Image (cartoon, helix red, strand yellow):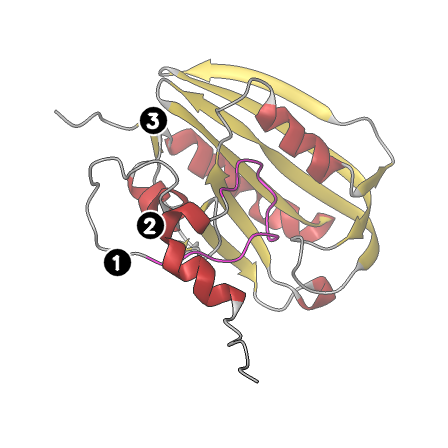
Amino acid sequence: MRRLAFVPLALVLAACGESGRAVHKVLLDGQAPPEPVIDQAAKPMETPPPNSAMLDSPAWLRANAPVEWTVPAGWEQELSTRPQRLVEFTIEKNGPGNAPLQFMLLRGVDEKPGANQVNVDRWTSFFEQDVAPKQTTTERDGLRFIRWRVHGKFQGQIALGTGDQINEANWTMLCGWIEAPTGSVLYKLVGPDATVAANESKVEALLASMKPRQQKQ
């Protein structure tokens, strides 16, 4: 009797090319598998085809971000390996819950109105708040800054899918998004009060340095 050959599903999907690739439209930090990293020195390129893996790669996102910024003194910028993240700044390599504490810039969700607020609400849901969150909106040089400060007991993982579950009082989150003429970026720093306070001036300096990215001629 002839046996049927078993073909692994991964090989079937690979043979299908881009049509077998899942497209991540909702920003779920840490839950999606990392995409291949493009050469960090690569210059901005023509827009890749729809549903291309390149559209989610941190190198592509960083090179084509709608804003430009200057790295604050004392911080080191790292190109992320996670989809949707542009760059990361590691503040503590071995933080609470065996996960690093990081300030991160992420791709804004511009496909649907209100989607950036959905992400901020999701991040806030990990807090048992002891004071009302503070929200401010300012405009400068063609940019709109929507900023949130959240405080209370943090319950969960610092980044979804990374590290252990923690339950820590006296934590702060600085987060929000920046709207530019060609799109938006999200940002987030979450950690113990003392850690966030020690790095808040760096966050302010980075946000203050932001300007709309110059359009290619």
Q: Residue at x 40, y 24 (%)?
A: 183
* Quarter containing the C terminus: top left
The answer, for residue 160, to whether it is visible in the render is yes
Q: Which numbered disc flags the more N-terminal residue, 1 or 2?
A: 1
Which residue bears the numbered disc 3? 211
- How many C-alpha atoms fall within 10 Å of the one at disc 1: few (<14), some, or many (≥20)? few
Residue 122 % position (x, y): 71, 36
Contact flag, marks 1 and 2 (Cβ < 8 Å): yes
In 3D space, how far apart are the residues under numbered discs 2 and 3 (Cα atoms)? 19 Å
Dot 1 falls on a residue whose secondary structure is loop
The answer, for residue 36, to whether it is visible in the render is no
Dot 3 falls on a residue whose secondary structure is strand
Image-quadrant location for residue 74: bottom left
Which residue bears the numbered disc 2? 59
In 3D space, how far apart are the residues under numbered discs 1 and 3 (Cα atoms)? 25 Å
Q: Which residues are magenta?
A: 23-37
Point out the residue furthest to the left here: 217
Residue 203 % position (x, y): 51, 40
Residue 92 % position (x, y): 58, 62
Residue 107 % position (x, y): 46, 37
Amino acid type, mark 3: Lys
Q: Which mark is residue 39?
A: 1
Q: Which numbered disc flags the more N-terminal residue, 2 or 3?
A: 2
Q: Which mark is residue 111?
A: none
Q: Residue at x 54, y 21 (%)?
A: 112
* Quarter containing the N terminus: bottom right
Dot 2 falls on a residue whose secondary structure is helix
Relative placement, left or right, of 41 versus 202 is: left
Is 19 above or below relative to 4? above
Q: Nearer the viewer, residue 58 or 55?
A: 55
Amino acid type, mark 1: Asp
- Residue 35 magenta: yes
